Amino acid sequence: MKKLAILGSTGSIGHSTLSICESFPDRYQVISLAAGQNLDTAFAQCERWRPRVISLATEELATALSNRLKATGITGIEVVHGTAGTVYAATLPEVDFVVSAIVGVAGLEATYAAVCAGKTIGLANKECLVAAGELIIEAARKHNVALLPIDSEHNAVHQAMRGGKTTEVKRIWLTASGGPFRNTPLVDFEHITPQQALKHPTWVMGQRITIDSATMMNKGFEVIEACRLFDLPPAQVRVTVHPQSTVHSLVEFIDGSILAQISVTDMRLPILYALAYPERVQSDLTFDLATLGHLDFSQPDLVKFPCLRLAYEAAATGGNACIALNAADEIAVAAFLAGDIPFLGIPRTIERVLALTLTSRPSSIVEVLAVDQAARACAREVIAQQATSTRA
């Protein structure tokens, strides 16, 4: 039986992981949870799963949860908080598999600590590898830790690469839905509203990742993540627009063979794959081949979607550029959602921040976080300057 720590237990990946635990109670046991700020959901998860440890974002939330558990008569659950609490939950000695699903760099320190503690990682947080991938990959090799991707695209690549040796891979293809503006003329991009951008054609996701899909920055992050997970240069990681989202990714081998992974658009499948690896277990997640009536593939338009171009440039540079890319994007997306900048203000902000970021490679997680904070401050200044020039 695998004993799990789920970081980001109240989010969509966390809920899907717990659903897998529900379906396979003889295979997976919940040991610890990191639940962020959702107090009601955290309490419900404590009632159902009785973890040994649960971490919340703040001391106030942890106190509130402790009081509620005590009032209900639930005992034996240690409630901790903050980054230190999440690290503690991720590195408990009895935990052997950590699902890293906290959005943004908030889960970075706990994921890195779990790798250094020798835990197998199911990685759903792409920002960890974007911002600190070089350090995490180095630590994983040092501690002989498996990093198993949960993102559907990288999970698909991982599955397809089992069909050949790493040295036989010519390139990998990450599929992209194209988002809601695949067919929108560039002239209309300046007038795109947050409400329009939040209508993803395929997936139901959080706000930031949905906007990142609309700008194709999400696919850019996946390019960087793929380079690091599969030890490939950016030139060997391609993106193809596939609106049906049926083929989750492809691997092309040196003899011309291409292996594609096809499955239902249900995150429980890649989660189950990662949890069960190297086994495969029977599930009810079946795919109807009759739906494969038509498949489209096309090249992404880097003029309409400059965020993807910026991500490739950051991937080639590495180090601080990738940290700044992620940090600036998070600030710019928040500003767009708040109505402070237009849709195309997102790539303009990121490009300016990258131009102002010094090229170097951090040697520790502390340095990564320092660069991240500096890039966020820079992005806020750039956005303020844009607002001033617009008013003028």
Image (cartoon, rainbow, N blue to C red):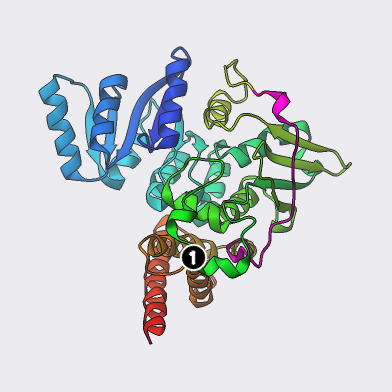
Helix, strand or loop status at disc 1: loop
Which residue is at a point 57% across and 27% down the rendered structure image? Answer: 269
The image position of residue 316, as x and y in percent, is: 65, 64
Q: Is residue 191 above or below residue 300?
A: below
Q: Nearer the viewer, residue 338 or 308?
A: 338
Overall secondary structure of the magenta stretch?
loop
Q: Nearer the viewer, residue 114 or 35?
A: 35
As shown in the figure, which amino acid type bears the numbered disc 1? Answer: Phe
Q: Dividing the picture into quarters, in which one does residue 55 lie? A: top left
302 within the magenta span: yes
> In the image, 360: left or right of 386?
right
Residue 187: image location, x then y, percent: 60, 70
- Which quadrant of the figure contains the C terminus? bottom left
Name the residue rendered at 55%, 66% in the picture: 189
The magenta region covers: 287-308
Q: Is residue 275 magenta?
A: no
Asked where in the image residue 151 lies, by quadrant, the reply is: top right
Instruction: Give the residue number, with chain letter if any, for mark 1.
Output: 343
